[in-house]
Amino acid sequence: MAFVPGENVDRFRKQFQSAETPSFFRAPGRVNLIGEHTDYNLGYVLPIALEMACYVGIAPASHGNLRVYSRDLDKEVSVPVADIASVKPSKQWSDYVLGVAQELVKAGFTIAPADVFIVSEVPAGSGLSSSAALEIATAVALLRGRAFPKVELAKLGQRAESKFVGMPCGIMDQYAAVFGHAGAALKIDCRSLGHEYVELPSNVRIIAANSLVKHELGTSAYRERVAECGQAVSALREIDPGIESLRDVSPEFFERVQESVPLTPRRRARHIISDTQRVVDLAAAARAHDLSEMGRLFVASHRSMQYDYQISCEEIDFLVDTAIKIPDVYGSRMTGGGFGGCTVNLVAPEAVDAFRQQLSAAYQDRYQKTPAFYDCLPAEGAGPLR
Ligand code: GLA
């Protein structure tokens, strides 16, 4: 649902029986255009931050606690601020918030008692990074304008997720939530943690299509992929000890030596190395306004996730295969962690209506579900709501 400030101030006061006016902070979701699972291999990624965001309202309180309410879930948790440093995860939504609070305490910040109100437009489980939006919105709200280097903010959110929530993620989502830029995609170098802006051609629309499925193996399969990439690195280091991550392996070198990597890690590495290259190629194609090349790279990336990284699923493959047969759709691929969520599609502006209709009808026919569509316009990263 779209965020309406006034209405949420009323809900805040009612929920917390408070007369305070909360300050609201926002952090966006993201759609990744290309470079999937390349972040924890220190390669490149190319996300755009979205208008769709998570909003966190905060106001001081006198009860000694960090009291947190999720409007979407209609649930509240409360932790004495003195216990934040030692609080343990509880395997529920509030872990994202408390993980961030704990990391801030570890970084030397004092967290004063407060009421915290959360509402998000980013659909959970959609591959559009609802968790990083929540982490980063929470962090900027708890900081309330206190200075914190942006890159450290992204790293803090990533630590909260990997150490407290227990999902060993890369940096992309939190980075995009912090550094998002209206009008451009971010080409992030996950090794140097620098980025450059990539403007997208104006004659194409980026449409995410939500399969509305999320297969359960998500976190365990993610962990498994991280481990398999590590195995590939170990095998490649036997040949060149200078290799520290798959980022250090060029496509040409890999082509020559791949036989010495065991089969499964070899396939995983092939995806990572080729998708890192595709980020570079997609950025160049976008700058050259070459839509058919952009589309070709999208589909190549999807096939690589489908067959080599093996993180797609039947419904997502169906959406991709159907989309690329629709006229004036340049390309389609899964976006995000995998096993469901969204596809991202490059569509000519005049073909968007037909694209939505045809994809909906086919998906409805096959799976008795209508995908949700999101128009993806690059938006700004986290900050106070003005
Ligand atoms: C999830 C993780 C990211 C990244 C993507 C896949 O969104 O949080 O760090 O690895 O999956 O590209």
Image: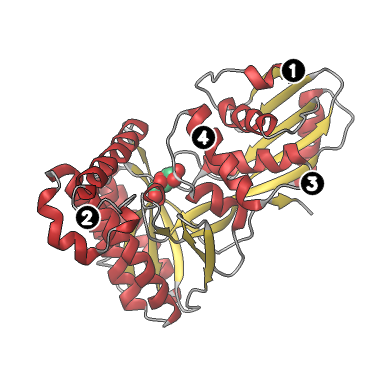
- SS for dot 4: helix
Crowdedness near tag 4: few (<14), some (14–19) or many (≥20) residues, C-alpha within 10 Å: many
- Reading the image, the residue beneath label 2 is 270
**Residue drawn at (60%, 39%), measured in percent from left and top?**
135
Residue 216 x/y as whole percent:
33, 31
Question: Is residue 70 among the parts visible in the rendering?
Answer: no
In the picture of the structure, the residue carrying the numbered disc 3 is 145
* Mark 2 burial class by Cα count in 10 Å: few <14, some 14-19, many 20+: many
- Evaluate if marks 1 and 4 touch, with contact meaning CB atoms under 8 Å apart: no
In-image side of 243 versus 384 (left or right): left
Disc 1 to disc 4, how far (Cα)?
A: 22 Å
Q: Earlier in the sequence, mark 2 or mark 1?
A: 1
Image colouring: secondary structure
With respect to residue 261, does 198 lie above or below? below
Q: Which mark is residue 161?
A: 4
- State yes or no: discs 3 and 2 in contact (Cβ < 8 Å): no
Say which label, 3 or 2, has the lower sequence index.
Answer: 3
Occupied quadrant, residue 302 = bottom left
From what the image shows, is residue 158 above or below residue 97?
A: below
Kind of residue indicated by mark 2: Arg
Viewer-closest of 372 and 279: 279
Dot 4 beta carbon under 8 Å from ligand 1: yes
Q: Helix, strand or loop at disc 1?
A: helix
Callout 1–callout 3 Cβ contact below 8 Å: no
Mark number, residue 82: 1
> Which quarter of the image is occupied by the C terminus?
bottom right
Q: Could you tell me if residue 279 is visible in this image?
A: yes
Where in the figure is residue 214, as x and y percent of width and height? 36, 37
Q: Earlier in the sequence, mark 1 or mark 4?
A: 1
Q: Residues within 10 Å of mark 3 (few under 14, many from 20)?
A: few
The local secondary structure at tag 3 comes to loop
Tag 1: amino acid: Ala
